[in-house]
Amino acid sequence: MSKYTTGEMAKLCGVTVRTVQYYDTRGILVPAELSEGGRRLYSENDLKKMRIICFLRELGLPIDSISQILSEDNSGSVISLVLKQQEQDLKEEIGERQEKLDKLETLKRELKNVTAISVESIGDIAYTMSNRKRLKKIHRNLLIVGIPISILQWLSIVLWITKGFWWLFVIWMLAGVPCIFLLSRYYFTHVAYICPQCHTVFKPLFREALWANHTPTVRKLTCNCCGHHGFCVEVAREEVDDHE
């Protein structure tokens, strides 16, 4: 069976000789035997153990924790649990960093659309980014109810044209139009807009917002603070009250 000196162990595991010696003094990695000259000699099992120690150290585990784990009778099971936990922690860390990266990339894209970059414009972009999840939830709720209403509308029209069932369309009108009105009220009750001129978050009149020219992210409105008329950025109203 192969025997390894301290220097050979250090070289095979990519650490310093002092590190191997330190693990010996801590009782974590005691050499299998000593030579006649008093030199440390390590076995194959010691080498495997050393590699496990180095691996756990790379994962960020402190020396005391590694010592306690290796002293357990079921150290293999404990290490397996530690690895699973470490894997979960790393995945969460990667997710957090990815989220930060996504925010950074979004901010860079938004800044390209800003003609004059200022502290206020960056603040508006940062606010809309933090507000985006809440706004998506509002849009999702709207679609959950709105899509079935739209499907029923077209179904009633098709049946009217193909089968002559005009009364189905009448029923839809009596029930669907009020539902659409209520959905619109829900939507504009839960959203507000940021004025690009004075950077104020404001709530437009329902009638103006309903008929205003718009895209999925902006709507052409008149700011009730500075009077500017133009496209304003849409945000979720629940967050707006805190922002104001």
Image: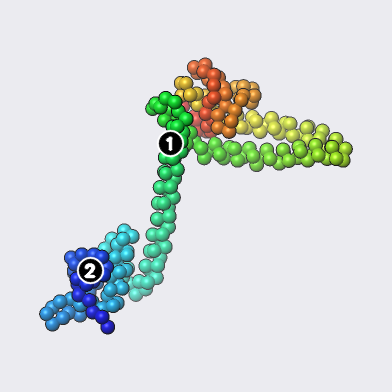
Residue 232 position, x and y percent, is 53, 26
Residue, x 17% and y 79% (percent of image)? Answer: 34
24 relative to 178 in the view: left or right: left
Label 2 near label 1: C-beta < 8 Å? no
Where is residue 224? Give x, y as percent: 53, 18
Task: Residue 108: give its label.
Answer: 1
In this view, the residue in front, 242 or 30, is 30
The x, y position of residue 178, in whole percent, is: 72, 31
Task: Count neighbours of disc 2 (C-alpha within 10 A) and say few if under 14, some if 14 to 19, many if 20 or more.
Answer: some
Whether residue 64 is visible:
no
Q: Report the residue marked by disc 2.
A: 10
Mark 2, secondary structure of its residue: helix
Residue at (41, 30) in percent of width and height: 122
**Measuring 62% from the left and 40% from the top, which residue is drawn there?**
141
Q: Secondary structure at mark 1?
A: helix
Give the residue drawn at x 88%, y 38%: 164
Query: Along the line of sight, which residue is nearer the eye, 144 or 11?
Result: 11
The quarter of the image holding the N terminus is bottom left
Report x, y in % for residue 130: 46, 37
**Other-residue count near label 1 (Cα within 10 Å), few / some / many at <14 / 14–19 / ≥20:** few
12 or 44: nearer the viewer: 12
